[in-house]
Image (cartoon, grey):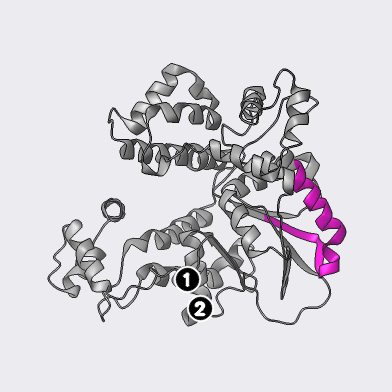
């Protein structure tokens, strides 16, 4: 997290992070002693689930569908945490009237759900959801009891009634709960998967796949008829990526789609044109001294400084943020003198410039390999750059897929 270092008086904006699956585990290691971090002009509050909440987080959305466990306890815990922020964040210098929640993956789904929930009304004022939305088909579950019964069975609980299931599960230790959640990841899946392992998991993410005819079509599209366990695993991961991220995000975007003004349309094309050039790597010499992707990002930030006022934006208060590779870009732009003065705050999630493979010792070799794969003359760095600069957008994407 980075903020500008100008003087501040009084209370400061508060950020509340809603953890994803992996982020939740890392959080306990990184922030074991403190969950409230003053950061100059921002106060960051990291929500850590309580002991019993392990059972009710995104990995295992537990509910019996009746009065004994009517809804997802993880989300109710998050509401309670946001209420705590309203009552206590002023003690850490934070402004309860200016709270932003943010999260990625499962954390993004949580953010999206809080935007919709009346229980969260007035508990926050801005929201950032990355790679996760409430439009995911598997989020609302009209019949949660089978999963609750499966959890009860795994725990050795009496499942003859919902009350007995809930009473039993509430007595579990943290270790017991972790064993249950690990069951929902097939043992040894990293070494390959079989079709038989996939079906029980799929219906948890997309209920429509309980229809065998639909499931057959989907599995054939992603997995084909190959018996190769590695190919099945990779196809399964791609399928989950579409179910969890790509399809929900497109659905959500369609809900907000409207007629763009000509200026807004040009803004989208210009900025996306910059991001789309990330495939152009450097050669390490005068023909391509550095990564064009970062130079394009700097150019886009310069464009924002010159033009964002036309869209009602404040060029003096620009925040950049990104996750995964986007987090690496954010972290690198913080360090780069080329980006100095072009933004004022930054949020990097799940990606930093400290990755060992980030700085390449021999970029020319990578450029030559890319050129060969993409049918360019690789005899000199000049020939490589001239060829790549002539690519159309479609050729850039095609080559990126090959690389």
Within 10 Å of disc 2 (Cα), the crowding (few <14, some 14-19, many 20+) is few
Q: Earlier in the sequence, mark 2 or mark 1?
A: 2
Dividing the picture into quarters, in which one does residue 159 lie? top right
In the image, is residue 93 part of the stretch drawn in magenta?
yes
The residue located at (55%, 75%) in the rendering is 342
Where residue 27 sits in the image (x, y, percent)? 63, 59
Give the foreground label among 2 and 1: 1
Q: Is 85 situated left or right of 20 in this image?
A: right
Element at label 2: helix
Q: Nearer the viewer, residue 317 or 221?
A: 221
Is residue 59 visible in this depiction of the protein? Answer: no
Dividing the picture into quarters, in which one does residue 116 lie? top right
Where residue 365 sits in the image (x, y, percent)? 22, 70
Numbered mark located on residue 335 in the image: 2
Q: Is 129 situated left or right of 10 in this image?
A: left
Where residue 315 sits in the image (x, y, percent)? 61, 71
Numbered mark located on residue 353 in the image: 1
The residue located at (67%, 39%) in the rendering is 55
Where residue 309 sits in the image (x, y, percent)? 61, 67
Helix, strand or loop for the magenta stretch, by majority:
helix
399, above or below 147, in the image: below
- In the picture, the quarter occupied by the N terminus is bottom right
The residue located at (50%, 73%) in the rendering is 333
Residue range highlighted in magenta:
76-101
């Amino acid at each position: 997290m980075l903020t500008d270092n100008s003087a501040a008086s009084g209370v400061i904006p508060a950020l509340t992070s809603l953890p994803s699956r992996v982020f939740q585990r890392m959080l306990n290691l990184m922030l074991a002693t403190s969950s409230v971090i003053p950061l100059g002009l921002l106060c960051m509050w990291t929500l850590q689930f309580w002991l019993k909440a392990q059972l009710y987080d995104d990995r295992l959305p537990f509910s019996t569908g009746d009065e004994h466990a009517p809804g997802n306890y993880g989300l109710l815990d998050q509401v309670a945490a946001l209420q705590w922020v309203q009552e206590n964040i002023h003690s850490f210098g934070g402004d309860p009237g200016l709270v932003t929640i943010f999260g990625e993956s499962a954390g993004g789904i949580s953010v999206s759900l809080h935007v919709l929930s009346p229980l969260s009304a007035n508990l926050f004022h801005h929201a950032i959801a990355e790679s996760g939305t409430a439009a995911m088909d598997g989020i609302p579950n009209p019949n949660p009891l089978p999963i609750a019964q499966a959890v009860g069975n795994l725990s050795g609980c009496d499942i003859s009634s919902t009350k007995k299931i809930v009473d039993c599960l509430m007595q579990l230790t943290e270790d017991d709960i972790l064993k249950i959640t690990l069951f929902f990841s097939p043992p040894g899946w990293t070494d390959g998967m079989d079709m038989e392992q996939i079906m029980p998991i799929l219906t948890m993410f997309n209920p429509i796949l309980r229809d065998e005819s639909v499931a057959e079509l989907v599995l054939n599209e992603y997995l084909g008829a190959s018996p190769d366990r590695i190919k099945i695993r990779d196809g399964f991961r791609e399928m989950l990526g579409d179910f969890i991220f790509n399809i929900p995000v497109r659905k959500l975007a369609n809900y907000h789609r409207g007629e763009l003004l000509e200026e807004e349309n040009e803004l989208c094309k210009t900025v996306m044109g910059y991001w789309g050039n990330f495939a152009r790597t450097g050669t390490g010499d005068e023909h391509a001294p550095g990564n064009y992707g970062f130079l394009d990002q700097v150019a886009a930030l310069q464009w924002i400084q010159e033009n964002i006022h036309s869209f009602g934006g404040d060029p003096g208060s620009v925040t950049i943020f990104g996750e995964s590779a986007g987090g690496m870009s954010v972290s690198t732009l913080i360090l780069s003198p080329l980006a100095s003065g072009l933004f004022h705050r930054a949020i990097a999630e799940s990606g930093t410039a400290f990755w060992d493979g980030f700085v390449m010792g021999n970029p020319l070799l990578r450029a030559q390999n890319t050129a060969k794969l993409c049918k360019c003359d690789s005899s000199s760095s000049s020939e490589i750059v001239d060829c790549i600069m002539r690519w159309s957008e479609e050729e850039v994407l095609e080559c990126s897929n090959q690389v």
